[in-house]
Every structure is written in structure tokens, then in C-alpha cells.
Image (cartoon, rainbow, N blue to C red):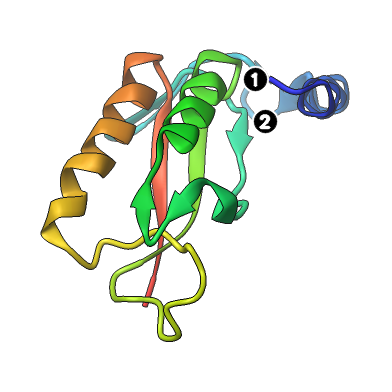
Amino acid sequence: MHNMSKTLLLLLIINFIQINTLENKKDLFDVTQFKYLKLKNRVFKGAIEDLGAFEKGKITDKILKRYDELSKAEIGTIITGVILVQPEPNGQLPIPTFEKDEYIEEYKKLTDIVHKNGANIIAQISI
């Protein structure tokens, strides 16, 4: 994890170390259960674009490594950057897509890496 990412995570922890609810106090690192979704903690990676890590809509080793590192750190849930369900109109940007069935295995591999490390992953889908 980069020093800037560590610093931002530390600031987040300092600012939100205890989350108060009406019923009880919850720590940022408490396990939380929503009906079918279990969160190892309440730390999320927001949907930030990963444009430099994709090639022609396909996942690269760079993105697999990045998500592996994030999910091994204290990130409980990762929200991906935008993933298109159809080709990028101009074909110029390396935006990830679900446009071809052959890409499904790549996303399964990405998901398996994140889950192996105990984190969740949520895809930000766009058309």
C-alpha cells in the first residue's frame, strides 16, 4: 500500500474510530452483517477509476495486484471503478467492460482474489 493510501486510511481511522448508533457503539473494525452480506469491517474503497490498469477493457496483472493488496489491507469492501456493459463508444479509453463473455473469467479471478482475502467487492456498472 502506498504511503499516501496509508496516511489516508490512518486519517479515516482517527476520524471515525467509533461509530455511534442509537443502540450501541460500533467500532470501525467491527464485523457487520446485512441480511446476506457480511462485512469484515466498515472500511470501504470508493469507486475510483482504475483506467491506467486496464487494456482494451480487459483486466491486467496490474489491477489484480492492486485489488489483492487492497483486500489484504484493512479494506473490508471494494467498490470498483466504472465497468461498462457495452463497448466504450469511441474505443479510446481503457475502460473495463463486460461486453464479451471471454471477460467473465477475468472478473471471476478478480472477485476470487478479493474474497480469498476476506473482503467484498461491488461492481459499479454503467451502460
Quote the CA–CA distance across marks 2 and 1: 5 Å
Note whether residue 38 is visible.
yes
Note whether residue 76 is visible.
no
- Kindly identify the residue that appears in the image at 41 percent across and 85 percent down: 89
- Kindly identify the residue that appears in the image at 87 percent across and 20 percent down: 14
Left or right: 77, with 121 as reference point:
right
Expressed as whole percent of the image width and height from the top left, the position of residue 56 reads 38, 61
Q: Nearer the viewer, residue 38 or 53?
A: 53
Residue 21 is tagged as: 2
Q: Quadrant of residue 21?
A: top right
Look at mark 1 in the image and give the residue it sits on: 24
Residue 2 is tagged as: none
**Residue type pointed to by label 2:** Thr
- Kindly identify the residue that appears in the image at 87 percent across and 25 percent down: 11
Badge 1: few (under 14), some or many (20 or more) residues near its Cα, within 10 Å? few
Q: Quadrant of residue 42?
A: top right
Expressed as whole percent of the image width and height from the top left, the position of residue 10 reads 83, 19
**Residue type pointed to by label 1:** Asn
Expressed as whole percent of the image width and height from the top left, the position of residue 25 reads 69, 18
| Quadrant location of the N terminus in the rendered image | top right
Badge 2: few (under 14), some or many (20 or more) residues near its Cα, within 10 Å? few
- Looking at this view, name the residue that lies furthest to the left: 101
Q: Which type of secondary structure does the marked residue at label 2 adopt?
A: loop
Dots 2 and 1: beta carbons under 8 Å?
Answer: yes
Q: Which type of secondary structure does the marked residue at label 1 adopt?
A: loop
- Answer above or below: position of 56 versus 121: below
Left or right: 12, with 58 as reference point:
right
